[in-house]
Amino acid sequence: MSVFITPLFVVCVLLVGTYFIAVIEQLLRLGLRSIGIALTLPLANAIRLLYQEDLTPRGADFFLFRSAPFIALAVVSLVALVIPLGPTLIAFNPSIGLFYFIVLLSPFVVAITNAAWSQNSKEGLFATFRAAAYLISYEVPIGFAAIGPVMATQSLSTQRIVEVQAGLWFVVWQPLGLAIYLIAALFVSFRHPFDSALAGSELEGGAFAEYSGGRLLLFKIALAALFLLLMAMGVVLFFGGWQGPVLPGPLWFALKTFALSALVLWLAHFFPRLRHDQMLTLSWKILLPASLLNITLVGILTLTIPVGR
Amino acid sequence: MSSGLIEWLIFLSLAMIAIVTAAGMIITMSMYRAGLALMASFVALAGLFILLNADLLAAIQVMMNVGGMLVMVLFMVMMMMDPGGEMMWGMKRDMHMRGPGALSMHMPSGPPPPEEQEGQLDAGAMSDMDVQETEVGGHDMSDMEMGSMTPRQNYTMMVDMAMSTAQLPWAIVLGVVSALLLVILLILTPWPLAGIAPTQDASRVVGELLLSRYMIAFEGAALLILAGIAGAVLLAKRERSRVQTPPETKQRGEQP
Amino acid sequence: MSWFTSSGGPGLLPYLLVGAILFGIGVTGVLSQRNSLMILMSIEIIINAAILTLVAFWRFVRPDQFDAQVFVIIIVTIAAVEMASGLGLVLMVFRQRGNANVDEAKELKQ
């Protein structure tokens, strides 16, 4: 029985978390006083999208166009299984948990590429190339940034990474790793400074240009859920996961995740949307050497400073 | 239901997916779907690895091959005339060619028909089918008169558009023969089976092995990757044409 | 025959048979496709069939020694490098000739 209950529970938690991410976005946009509007606007948008007519462009690839949102949601649900919510509250704890997480970020981009390609439009074609280029560009920085905590923990299991941080959170002595991870996380989830593949003004919506109605809602939920999961994994890797003095584990985890998401979304507002070549420059010329430097630093620190192992 | 039966069911479904999508990759007309089919085949293989208790290898397989096949699909979209298969499907429909719509076209067999005399038919629109078409969706077939092509031009067009060579029957024969040879070899050999299950944590042991016993292979692979990167970048670089310098700037000895 | 089942589930032989069939499909693809990119992808099928066979042997013949997994990692690395080099070459040929057919690339000069 529990093999069905636990994933269902995970999916419900994911939907609630996505709703709160949308609320945080609205709060940042409207200011902290309009909390009533911020709580209801995401639901209103969702209901409006559900009522919208579901169009399919002429000549769209029949199978790919319809299946892309579901593939995106399936990948996001699979990724969510490996996040530890509490001391024993984890749906799926393989010994290579973190590696599983990073590996499953690639099929998500495949779903976006399918969506972009199957629309049979010029903007979709550009979005296909851009999304695939970003996949290759961010995989190495996010992997290297996540290796830092793995080196300190000597294990790839997410639960173990959280347990080792009981004494000192990893963010204290790996700030560069956190910075690289957050930038790469914005890349992965096609968020504001890096949403060149989904650019509303530039590419008419890019990969989502021809999507409308329920399918667009599914895609938006999948993107927001992916962002939430990346922030949750950032909390697990750098901020001690569910560790905290007084409150129960899951509550600390939720607070930390939403605090980190709010911080990242707020910081992202200061930057203009990057052009395609600027994004590639950022990834290959700045993030990649920085992540190599990060590994060197973390390796030296792990060997010389005993930090609560 | 016993766990053995469930394991058999999962194995059979994953194996069927792997084999059918790999065959589908060769058969289908749309290049994008061929790349996706191969990706699906590799993900099914990763599932088989998980059944074989090799989850680290399954994760590595998914990571490398999903990214790799996506790059392959990108190259196909860049280089092929009709990557989505749209034009060929339309052609098959309009010209009532035989065979199911989604399957690729074969080269026509037999010698090409003789050239027609000049001036008999005007089919200039069909002569440059090799031109790289960068738009999605390819040529618009409605403005070409399909019935007005000479047999020779029809033959040339079919040759240009076919996905498989004329030696497809021989290729299938060789493929079947090699598979059969392997199957017979595999069934007849007495494999020494160990009845135990793997017990250790794969990533830890593999990491230790890579850095102790197989250090040379590890470093060699790293060197190979470096050589591959340098080579691929060099091959893909475009030649920049030398700009003609005007005569008054050629006084290098005098001006710094 | 204990090669076919192992504690109820599939044993060694079913995995080897799947590998053999995939190898046959890969050989058919390499020999019958005109586009060099399709040939590269068929080579990938062959390599992955070999990897499946290797992992099946590891699991059922020597599960206590993880050398086979190291071998697989190196093979996957080399396959990726080979594909990258192949793509670079195909790109060069494409720039010279305008299409990527191997049938027409039979001679060195155009």
Image (tube, coloured by chain):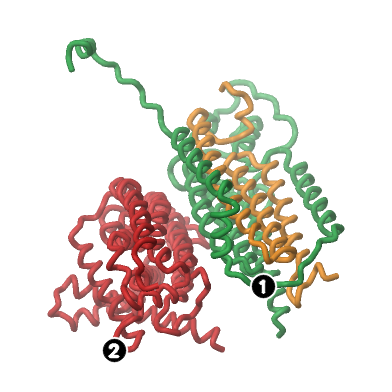
Which residue lies under the disc numbered 2? A246
Give the image location of residue A182, x and y in percent. 30, 63
Q: Note whether A7 is above or below B138 in the view shown.
A: below
* Nearer to us: label 2 or label 1: 2
Q: Which chain is green?
A: B
Which residue lies under the disc numbered 1? B10
Query: Which numbered marker is on residue B59?
Result: none
Q: Chain of mark 1?
A: B
Q: CA distance from mark 2 to mark 1?
A: 45 Å
Residue A53 visible in rendering: no
Q: Note whether B25 is above or below A192 in the view shown.
A: above
Q: Residue at x 20, y 57 (%)?
A: A271
Give the image location of residue B152, x and y in percent. 65, 30
Q: Residue at x 73, y 51 (%)?
A: C24
Q: Quadrant of the C terminus of chain B?
A: top left
Tag 1 secondary structure: helix
Picture quadrant of residue A245: bottom left
Give the image location of residue A236, x and y in percent. 37, 73
Picture quadrant of residue A109: bottom left
Left or right of A301 in this view: B229: right
Mark 1: amino acid:
Ile
- Taking depth in this image into account, of B92 and B76 the one nearest to the observer is B76
Disc 1 crowd rating (10 Å Cα; few below 14, some 14-19, many 20+) is: some
Marks 2, 1 in one chain: no
Give the image location of residue B214, x and y in percent. 59, 51
- Taking depth in this image into account, of C102 and A54 the one nearest to the observer is C102
Q: Residue at x 72, y 72 (%)?
A: B196
Left or right of B10 in this view: B72: left
Left or right of C22 in this view: B25: left
Q: Residue at x 65, y 50 (%)?
A: C47
Colour for chain A in the figure: red
Colour for chain C in the figure: orange
